[in-house]
Amino acid sequence: MKVIFLFIAFLACYPLHAQEDERWVQAIARAEQDTERYIRERIEAGWWYKGEDTLHVMLVRDTMRIEQAVRYFSEQVKTTADMRSMNHFLLDEYDKLLNKYYNRLRGKLSPAQREALLKAQREWLKFRDVEGDFIYKLIIDNYGTMGPVLIGSDCVELLKNRVFQLYSYLQYMD
């Protein structure tokens, strides 16, 4: 828990919220266009059915948009502040996906399964906090100004992995 608060407090010290930076606005717009074009091309090629809103297409749309935006923004990264902005964007976006896939999964479960999912999610949150504390202690004193960037990247990976874990559970339900 401590590392998450420290990381958020650190990010809060810099008025670099991803959505406020014009470069992010451009990167996100470009990524959304590319993602929709990619999906449209797959539909036209017969890989997916037109209008299909399968779980796989949803995951591709959700994650490709995020990763493409980061790729486009990365072309302009010049400072550690830019890297922190990128981590902030990733944390925000993958947190939205975590909630989306958690709620979608929750909606498909029986009451007993929902209770088990709630317990698992609470335990995962505890794990995330303990793991974040370890990452913080491992990195913070050894990497100077890059320390918070590395910590943020590892926190993003924890979150992203949980999103994919919930997606895999949803596949059991379809």
Image: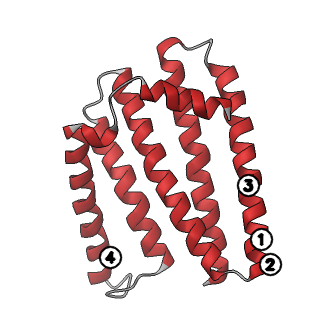
Task: Determine which residue is flagged by label 3.
Answer: 122
| Earlier residue among tags 3 and 1 | 1
The residue that label 4 is drawn on is 42
Q: Which residue is mark 2?
A: 112
Q: Quadrant of residue 35?
A: bottom left
Q: Answer few, some or many: residues within 10 Å of disc 3's Cα (few below 14, many 20 plus, some between 14 and 19).
A: few
Residue drawn where x is 75% and y is 80% of the image: 111
Residue 45 lies, in percent from the top left, at: 29, 81
What is the CA distance from the residue labelled 2 to the residue labelled 4? 38 Å
Q: CA distance from mark 3 to mark 2?
A: 16 Å
Given the image, on which type of amino acid does mark 3 rest?
Arg
Q: Mark 4 is on which residue type? A: Arg
Name the residue type under label 1: Glu
Q: Residue at label 1?
A: 115
Report the label total.
4
21 over 61 or under it: above or below: above
State the image coordinates of residue 14 (x, y, percent, origin top left). Answer: 37, 24
Residue 105 sits above or below residue 92 on the image = below
Tag 3 secondary structure: helix
